Amino acid sequence: MGTRYNITASNGDSEAIKISIEELLDGFNESLSTYIPFSNISQFNQETKPFSLALKDDPYFLPVLELSSEIYFNTNGAFDPTIMPLLEYYGFGSIRHPMGENVDLKKDSILQLIGFEKVSWEKKNGNLLIHKSNPGIQLNFNSIAKGYGVDLVAQLLEKEGVHNFLVEIGGEIRTKGVSSRKDEWKLGINTPHPDARLQEYLLTLKVSDVGMATSGNYRDFYTKDGRKYVHIIDPRSGENKESTLASATIIAQDCATADAYATACIVLGLEESIAIINELPEVEGCFITFDDGTYNLHFTEHFNQYINE
């Protein structure tokens, strides 16, 4: 997935489990990684006809499609895996590069390829058949795949009888049980500034038996001709501009859900994010804005239960 991972666990055969995790993540990458030319998602993106894959060989693609569809509609399109052409256009795709001149030149034609309702799928004779309404449509699950990968590793650890663990892939996290201190896992929300150290926190949380993800544009961006380009793009308008949110942290029962909603909230902004997350069962959010030189924290209705006093 183009990043690194870290796992802390308190029991189990660590070497054998490590091998199992590596095998799991290798198979997962071969399904959903846009960094691998022969992965199933890369093949789908290059295909112009309906794409078929065997469900027994790839158990990952369908669950991500289904969860993505649910979150796409819940966020009114703010989370949209068909965003790949926009990521490529702005230079945040498979090849990183500053975009060319005339930002709006191709926007109308690119937007014809955006919209998750333009992708459909069906199960047929043990295969997953995925259709695209336009041959130029491409998928990118990078805003949910890391979270789903965290969930898969957590499930593997539970199956192996590991009762206390923290799994982290590229900053997306899932916890279970207690830490080595025999109390709840303690995690910090990083100060959303490009020069902030990773250990520089605005808030410390106590989180056990949940998934957690934080999104923001404060680290992944570039500046060209005096304009800042950020990696989280509004798929509805195709616009690339800084969010009114400096960061969004979502806590949910699984990390894939937290991962996807955290990204969507950066697109949605503060008020709409709070309204949407407050309607979701067992999902809470912490949103950071930067106003008049000060960081301000905003919480959904029941987020306080996670704050480490």
Image (tube, grey):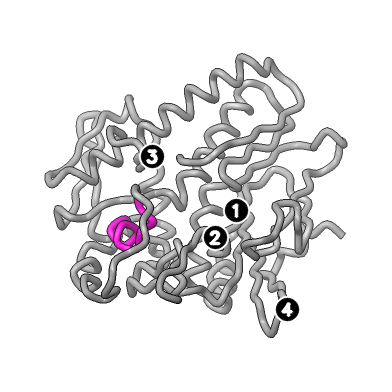
Task: Name the side, left or right, on which 81 lies relative to 242.
Answer: left
Residue located beneath label 4 in the image: 294
Gap between marks 3 and 2, in whole Å? 20 Å
Instruction: Give the mark nearer the N terminus: 2 vs 1.
Output: 1
Q: Residues within 10 Å of mark 1 (few under 14, many from 20)?
A: many
Q: Main secondary structure of the magenta part?
A: helix
Q: Foreground: 27 or 92? A: 92
Could you tell me residue 168's position as x and y percent?
62, 40
Q: Is 85 in the magenta?
A: yes
* Residue name at image x 51 percent, y 74 percent: 243
Q: Foreground: 289 or 72? A: 289
Gap between marks 1 and 3, in whole Å? 19 Å
Give the residues drawn in magenta, as a range.
84-93
The disc label shown at residue 213, or none: 1
Secondary element at tag 2: helix
Residue located beneath label 3 in the image: 33
Residue 59 lies, with reference to residue 183, above or below; the image says above
Q: Residues within 10 Å of mark 4 (few under 14, many from 20)?
A: few
Callout 3 amino acid: Ser
Gap between marks 3 and 4, in whole Å? 38 Å
Callout 4 amino acid: Thr
Callout 2 amino acid: Ala
Instruction: Give the mark nearer the N terminus: 3 vs 2.
Output: 3
Q: Is 186 in the magenta?
A: no
Secondary element at tag 4: strand
Do the CB atoms of the residues marked 2 and 1 lie less than 8 Å apart? yes
Q: Foreground: 210 or 114? A: 114
Question: Which quadrant holds residue 92?
Answer: bottom left
Residue located beneath label 2 in the image: 262
Which residue reaches farthest left?
A: 49
